[in-house]
Amino acid sequence: MQRGQMDQKRVADTPEIELFVKASSDAESVGNCPFCQRLFMILWLKGAIFKITTVDMKRAPHVLKTLAPGSQPPFLLYNGELKTDTNKIEEFLEEKLAPPQYTKLGCRYKESTSIGEDIFRKFSAYIKNPNPGLNDMLQKKFLSTLVKLNMYLETPLTHELDQNPHATESCRPYLDGDTLTLADCNLLPKLNIVKVVCKKYRDFDIPAELKGLTRYLDNASKKDEFRFTCPNDAEILIAYQSVAKYLNAK
C-alpha cells in the first residue's frame, strides 16, 4: 500500500468522538466535575482526535435532552453511539483506542487502581461537618487516607526493584510508574478538588512531610493533560459552597 493510500485509510479509520462535559457557571468553560475531567484526560493522553462540548444543565438545549434524557455529563458519542456510564466509557476507550495508533493507559499494578479510593469519602465527611467538636477526629481519618496514598507513592514498585534491588524509596512521578495511567485520570481530579476546598474551608494544606504525595502532585501539575483539563478554582468553590461548612461554635 502506498503512503497516500495509508494516510487515507488512517483518516477513514479515525473515529468521530465527542465528549460532553459539565459547563462552568458562566457556561463558557469546563465546570467542576471529576468524572468529566477523568474522561477528558483519557482522550487527551491517548492522542485521540475529539470534540469537547460543554453542557449547561440549567439551559440545556433540546437536542441534548433528546440525546441523553435524564443523564448528567459526562457522556460520549463514539461514531454516533451514545455512552453514558463513566466506568464503562473508560473501559470502552481503552479497548477501542488501542496500540499501535493510540496509547495504552492501563496499569501494570492492580494496587495502583485502588489506592486512594477512600480519600474522597473521608474528605466529604471532613469538609461537610460544621461541628468543631468532631473536626479533629474527621481530619485524622481524612489525613490517614493521604498518608496511605503517600506510603504507596514512596514504596518502590517491582520494576523499580528490578532496576535497583537496594532501593528503599520510590522516585517514580506517578501512581504506576513514569507515565500517567487510567488510575491517575481517576485520582488526580479528586485530589485537585480536595486541595482547593480544604484550603478554603479548613485552611488545610497537604502536609509537606508527605513527600511522595507532594512529588506526585507537583509532577502532575506540569502535565498539560492534567492542568489544562482542570476547572478554575472558583468553579470548584462554587460547586461546594452549598455543602462545605465553615466550623461553627457549639
Image: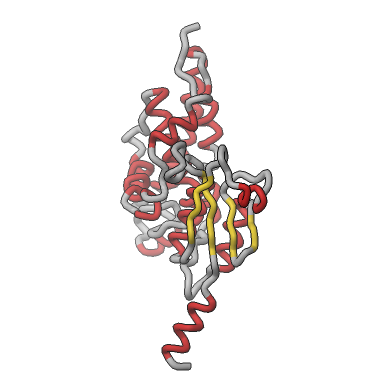
In the displayed orientation, state which residue is furthest to the top: 250
Looking at the picture, tell me which residue is in the foreground, 162 or 124. Answer: 124
In the displayed orientation, state which residue is furthest to the front: 62
Say whether residue 156 is left or right of residue 110. left
| The image quarter in which residue 143 lies | top left
Q: Residue at point 36% right, 53% down?
A: 173
The image position of residue 202, as x and y in percent, is 41, 23
Looking at the picture, tell me which residue is in the foreground, 182 or 163. Answer: 182
The image position of residue 56, as x and y in percent, is 53, 42
Say whether residue 96 is left or right of residue 23. right
Q: Residue at point 62% right, 52% down?
A: 63
**Count of numbered labels shown in the rendering:** 0
User: Is the residue 169 above or below the residue 162 in the image?
Assistant: above
What colouring does the structure picture have? secondary structure
Q: Residue at point 53% right, 31% down?
A: 122
User: Is the residue 115 above or below the residue 122 in the image?
Assistant: below
Say whether residue 39 is left or right of residue 69. left
Q: Residue at point 42% right, 29% down?
A: 198
The image position of residue 209, as x and y in percent, is 33, 35
User: Is the residue 160 above or below the residue 34 in the image?
Assistant: below
Residue 168 visible in this rendered orientation of the protein: no
Looking at the picture, tell me which residue is in the foreground, 158 or 112. Answer: 112
Residue 52 visible in this rendered orientation of the protein: yes
